[in-house]
Image: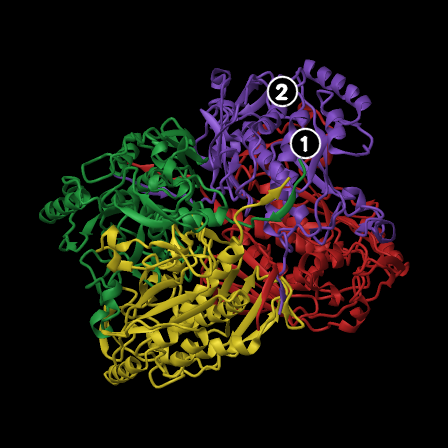
Chain colours: A green, B yellow, C purple, D red
């Protein structure tokens, strides 16, 4: 067949993340499967399949009354890169089949753009879109990130690095700061309620609120806070790949995220330097610490050994059960009613995604720079 | 000389930014020069040296009473990649000599770590640091970013894309939202005061406040807001290089930045979906617009043609004129007094840096994906 | 479990190829499946599954008496990135299950290193290896490359770019230069014999020779020549990503390749400039051509519109049916006898791999630089 | 000024090389300066400026009667990244001013394309070219590579890794294989003659021949052979970044290179496996070696500890002093006579460039993978 070229793509698609611990994901909401290849995981890392599946279970739909009712087992399978229970240093491919696509729920969408979704921008950008369930723009692809992030977490755990996130806000309901002792304790409290808040009292309030929003056929936003323990000094690559900049990009790449802050965050912009500085002291163990931690564990873009603290803001999910006005591809007015199965509030399911993305950044930077110098003796 | 290896570096240093419009910067605060190579700028772009120097002049130290008093002309020179006034498609090297280094101001720093600076983390990471003026961690390297960003802006201007930032907050003083008509008008108002706020009344208040903080020997933080006009639909590369994620990483890589939000930002996390959705309509010009813009011009990580809106939070600069307690490299208690010449508030000088980083992201994504598809006719 | 770190990996694994048309492969010889993700293929490209499977059939084992007798159908499946027969611009995942692994054939290999294989180097590098069939070092992973290369070829065919390789040498038997008219004719002649030589007389000689080598339980090397038709002017990115440099790296990454040359090649190094220069003339069609083509279609690293010509040298495969002396992991002497099922000469099956790798390079560079300039009118 | 866009660039320019030890070069033949930024060199490496300048002196023009007579001192200056004689881990910028440009020598070239040069392809690709001296396509940019390669060599020398190249062929004159004992001895012999051949007898023959070619106003090609001592086991990243594939790309990126082979090379393609295999034995030092080295020190793309051996073929330089027929930009017939100052044979000056590129590859891979695994104890 003869072709002449009208337009062309010079697209460098952004489906990979990381430099040394590098993942590439694929898969659409209503396609056959989603998955990921990890390239650069060190060899000889023991792989705990139960752990990986457990992380996916925290993200999967249909897990409680306050999440979407789509049912997926999100069962992951490893196709390569692991031999006799350990990584071989070759690429690790992980596959998660899609099971419960209800494509006909979206047959009414082929021509109209749902407000605040990516329908319009994907159609404009590619000239073609898989309209079923949002295609690649659906949050379903985050399952692949959680699978890869679980392996990153296993790597970090060998260094005692723990990534601990929880839901700190739902709508205007804010949890108080939570004192974190050990990872196990923190996770036990957090997993004891379906909203994944580490303060049980606030959790109750949040669950009630989300349930009422759901009954309204509406949605609401929230915030996830993350605390990283035992990050060694030195991670982060100035000037552009500063650790907090990479964490920010990682979090902002998650669906529905509209804001990122670390340490003193936006509040810090209202402070004075004399109030804000973290004074260095020598700890009783002999290492260097700071009395306060406005820096959120990162100075000059490099980790300083104090806990890393950041917060991620999620907007309310766009699909609501009310009718809304919109346009179709021709720009003509149309009406759309939200069908499909949606979360009234995404943040309970976002917690493992935030942890996974943080793990991918930390694993990458840990590999990128354990030591940034060569030490020679004559 | 014989060497045996004690430790080694497997460092992938992060001094490059961008994929197709790619910059690599070099240079330290008290070294001979700073500079940048741009690789990937299209050929045949006319280069306006006055414009580039003008952007650098907005960033340079010693520009007003409310900035650091270090005097640099920040005169930029192009060494390659431009022939007869146009780019050749080969790498463009730009050089900015350092002139007013007062290295002895820092001779007291060789052994102690200034609180909330990068002294400690750089020393721990590399085992060696250029202590003069913060070395590579100093904000001086941002001059190279502004130089490169100016060329990115020239490229974007050929497409009528305008990047317009201003100081929207200093400490707790917030400017009201500013109605933006044309780029020229906006810039005229903004440049009419030394704090670069586009609301003249608030600007007065801000200048007075910063001056009093300076007299206290203290510093204060602030926020810069940015509005991008005429961004075409389709920029951004899901799933990891979403446009707002790349903007976030770009902004967070600037010294002293602790937070980034776009569109409805952190406030949006408190809203309901029914309040938050941007309804599509057809504009009188025939193109598709939204009535509101909580999405900040970006949906699913791809620009939708509405103005892009984001905000960057800066912490107060860490060097203050008070004595502070700290430790030295051995962990022993020491005292430090801030010398050197410092900004009481960085945000007036940060405005051109924010614009430069936004330009680098937009130029990169504009090149990365003008059209994401091939259109064939049989 | 508590871990302390003895050694660490700072590995940037090289399992990806390409910048804009970027592939990442995974899979081992005796694992469950091999596969590839393509990121950056333009949207709206029609996908011809028969064509893709046809390319894989040319590479697969068990295809004739002069290749390995391992039987694989190499049936490929696409899991994402294609909707209603066209690419969507999202990542394309392709999966090829392994069927005929005879892992017990390799149970004698767990402790010894086969000469001239990668057993020793993989064991030394990773500290662990999947000894079955060579694991990731096996040529089986090239099936994934051929699958991805088939899609690259479909893209190039929309521009009439044709990649035409054939076996030009087996051992000391060299085919004469072949006059190439159309792609269809060339492929018809080449596929008419099992050694894939485009000169039928030489093909007979080659087949007879390989068969005798096989009966000896030995192997022999050969060369594959490649001719690319209709490559547009301008492909290639000086100074490091010159087109011939990228082709060279692509070919050298194929198992058993020991040499690459283009244009006048090694023979050109013996010539004088006065004999070697390609004189420009204007063709009857009005475009610029050269009378001779010692440049092999590439000047200064950029394609000039003349056919691209290069040659790839393959060493004899290392597994032979004779006993050989070797060592085991402890360095102790051991004997090894070649089992498994192997090719007496790899070049017939290498032809589609050479074409696939060339297609990946050309597709990448075609996307990287259709036009290297912006053309503006006031 | 108003612009509308006719064409655009989606160019990913290839002016960077390496992943972890990463260089970006800039500069044209007749521009102000050429230079390079190295990003990723470990901190604390002592920098020997005399050594670096010495390497540049081996490449510079005007060094003998058998090279071009253009006079440049190629004096290099380091602008950043080195403090008190050691690298800081921040980017190292190196600058080499151009001194002896004779731009008027090229004023006759503005409209015509010199045969076998890159004039035509650059003009077609970018729509603009700096015609003076070949602009960016000139071999002058290789000075920047040698400067950066010198620092890579200093890094490798700390590990006793030595890179030793010499001219093994000029035209049809081939040197016999040279037995290499120590690096110092090899270099002493090689530098004792102006053609840089490590066999003094052949060197005499070569010099006489080149001189006669020069008097003819003609040019001739040649080959450079390279031997790398003490490369540790494990360097190289399958499957695409195999060590020999990266070396091949590096060498092919050098001006005038038309072929690359390693180990048994093209000759190996004529051999049988039974003749070709390298048998493993345990050396008297206890490490694993092979009796022969057809593998050229690399198996499965990974170094095995044996010397790495490869060969690079250079075509004759294209500028000759005879008149030649050509065309101009409009495709009209024109005549051109070679002016400017050119090498009759490039290989003596290519030796340090080959060594520099090999050093960049080895340094990058040494950083990329010292150990490819993590070794944990419970």
Q: Which of B18 and D186 is in front in this view?
A: B18
The answer to whether D72 appears left or right of D238 in the picture is: right
Residue, x 49% and y 40% (percent of image)?
A: C88
Residue B69 in view: yes
Which quarter shows the C terminus of chain D?
top left
Q: Where is residue A96 in the image (x, y as percent from the top left)?
A: 37, 31
For the residue pair A175 and D91, the one nearer the viewer reads as A175
Query: The residue tagged with tag 2: helix, strand or loop?
Result: loop
- Is disc 1 placed on a helix, strand or loop? strand
Q: Is residue A94 left or right of residue D103?
A: left
Q: In this view, does C225 lie above or below C105?
A: below
Residue that lies at the very extreme toward the left in this rendered image? A201
* Badge 2: chain ID: C
Q: Position of residue C129 (x, y in %)?
A: 46, 29
- Mark 1 burial class by Cα count in 10 Å: few <14, some 14-19, many 20+: many
Q: Nearer the viewer, residue A370 or A163?
A: A163
Real-space CA distance between mark 2 and mark 1, rounded to the nearest whole angstrom: 16 Å
Chain containing mark 1: C
* Spot occupied by residue B39 in the image (x, y as percentages of width and height): 56, 60
Location of residue A198 in the rendering, given as x and y in whole percent from the top left corner: 15, 47
In this rendering, position of residue B334 left or right of residue D17: left
Q: Which of marks 2 and 1 is in front?
A: 1
Q: Is D310 located above or below residue C336 in the figure?
A: below
Name the residue carrying label 1.
C314
Contact check, label 2 and label 1, Cβ < 8 Å? no
A315 sits to left or right of B185: left
- Residues B94 and C218: in front is B94
Name above or below for residue D324 compared with residue D270. below
Rendered position, D87 above or below A171: below
The residue singled out by tag 2 in the image is: C320
For the point 46% across and 72% down, the residue is B143
Q: Do labels 2 and 1 share a chain?
A: yes
């Amino acid at each position: 067949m003869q072709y002449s070229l009208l337009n062309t793509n010079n697209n460098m698609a952004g489906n990979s993340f990381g430099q040394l611990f590098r993942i590439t994901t694929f898969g659409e909401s209503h396609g056959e499967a989603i998955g990921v290849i990890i390239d650069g995981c060190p060899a000889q890392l023991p792989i705990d399949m139960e752990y990986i599946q457990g992380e996916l279970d925290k993200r999967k739909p249909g897990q409680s009354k306050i999440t979407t009712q789509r049912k997926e087992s999100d069962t992951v399978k490893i196709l390569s890169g692991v031999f006799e229970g350990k990584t071989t240093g070759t690429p690790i491919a992980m596959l998660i089949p899609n099971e419960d696509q209800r494509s006909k729920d979206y047959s009414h969408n082929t021509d109209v753009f749902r407000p605040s979704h990516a329908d319009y921008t994907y159609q404009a950008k590619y000239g073609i879109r898989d309209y079923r369930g949002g295609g690649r723009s659906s949050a379903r692809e985050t399952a692949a990130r959680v699978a890869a992030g679980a392996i990153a977490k296993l790597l970090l755990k060998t260094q005692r690095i723990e990534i601990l996130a929880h839901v700190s806000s739902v709508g205007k309901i804010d949890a108080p700061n939570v004192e974190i002792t050990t990872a196990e304790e923190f996770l036990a409290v957090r997993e004891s309620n379906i909203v994944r808040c580490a303060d049980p009292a606030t959790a109750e309030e949040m669950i009630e609120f989300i349930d009422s929003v759901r009954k309204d056929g509406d949605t609401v936003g929230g915030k996830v806070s993350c605390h990283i323990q035992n990050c060694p000094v030195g991670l982060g690559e100035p000037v552009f790949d500063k650790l907090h900049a990479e964490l920010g990009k990682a979090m902002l790449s998650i669906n529905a995220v509209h804001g990122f802050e670390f340490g003193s965050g936006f509040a810090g912009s209202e402070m004075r330097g004399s109030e804000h500085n973290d004074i260095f002291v020598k700890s009783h163990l002999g290492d260097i610490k700071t009395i306060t931690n406005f820096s959120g564990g990162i100075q000059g873009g490099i980790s300083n050994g104090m806990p890393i603290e950041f917060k991620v803001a999620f907007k309310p999910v766009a699909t609501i059960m009310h009718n809304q006005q919109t346009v179709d591809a021709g720009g003509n007015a149309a009406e759309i009613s939200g069908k499909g199965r949606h979360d009234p509030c995404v943040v309970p399911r976002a917690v493992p995604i935030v942890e996974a993305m943080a793990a991918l950044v930390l694993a990458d930077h840990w590999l990128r720079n354990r030591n940034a110098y060569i030490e020679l003796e004559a």
